[in-house]
Image (cartoon, rainbow, N blue to C red):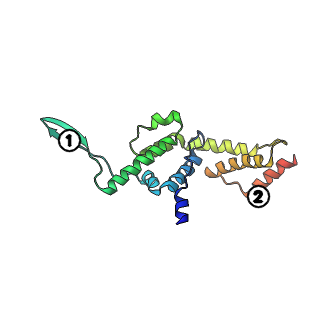
Amino acid sequence: MEFESAHSNTTAKLPILKLGEYEMWVIRIKQYFQVQDYALWEVIENGNSWVSVPQTAQENGTSVTKMSVPVTAEEKTNKKNDVKARSLLLMALPNEHQLTFSQYNDAKTMFAAIETRFGGNEATKKTQKTLLKQQYENFSASSTESLDSIFNRLQKIVSRLAILGVVITQEDLNSKILRKFKT
C-alpha cells in the first residue's frame, strides 16, 4: 500500500522541445507519456479509434449537420486520452509554435506534424551528423574548466551522435579525454 501511494504521487516535468534537440525530446516525451499514462502514448502511436462522424438531419425543413459524440465508455476513454495527449503535446512545444500545431484535431496527426517540422529530413540529419563529428574531432577544453564540465560537454556530443547512429567507442572517448589533459 505504501508503495502504491508513493508511486502515484510521482510526477515528471513535461519536456519542452528546444530547437535543434528534437531527437532527445522524442525520447523524453515518450518516457513522459509512458510514466503519466501509457494509454496516452498508445493514442499518439496508434491514433484514437473513435472518430467523430458528421450526420446530416432535416429539422423544420432545414438541413442541419451534427457531429456524433462518444457513446460507449471505451469511446469516451479514447476521446479523453486523445484530448489529453494532444493538450500535453501542445504544452511541450515552444510558445511560438503553439498556434501552428493547435490546428491538428488528434494527437497522432499532431505528433507526425511535429516530427516533420522538427525532425528534419535525411539531408538535415546528414548535415547535423557532420557538424557533430567536427565538434567531436575539434573538441577542446580550457585549463580552468572543471573535469565534470569537460566530460558533460563531450558526453553531450557523443550522445547526440549516438542518436544519429554514429557510435564512439569507450576507448576512443577515453583517448580523447586523456589527450585533452596532456595538452
Disc 1 or 2, which lies upstream in sequence?
1
SS category of the residue bearing label 2: helix
Specify the quadrant that holds the C terminus: top right
Furthest-right residue in view? 182
Front residue (pair 68, 155): 68
Expressed as whole percent of the image width and height from the top left, the position of residue 117 reads: 51, 39
One can see residue 49 in this view: no
Task: Look at mark 2 in the image and give the residue it sits on.
Answer: 171
Residue toward you, 11 or 99: 11
Mark 1 or 2, which is nearer the eye? 1
Q: Residue at x 15, y 38 (%)?
A: 59
Q: Secondary structure at mark 1?
A: strand
What amino acid is found at the position of numbered circle 2 in the picture?
Answer: Glu
Number of marks present in the image shown: 2
Q: Which residue is mark 1?
A: 56
**Depth check: 59 or 125 in front?**
59
Q: Residue at x 72, y 43 (%)?
A: 135
Amino acid carrying label 1: it is Thr
Measured in 3D between alpha carbons, the distance from the residue under mark 1 to the one under mark 2, in whole angstroms, is 68 Å
Image spot of residue 48 (x, y percent): 38, 51
In the rendered image, the vertical position of residue 98 relative to residue 180, given as above or below? above
Residue 66 in view in this figure: yes
Residue 130: quarter of image: top right
Residues at badges 1 and 2 in contact (C-beta under 8 Å)?
Answer: no
Residue 172 picture location, percent across and down = 76, 55
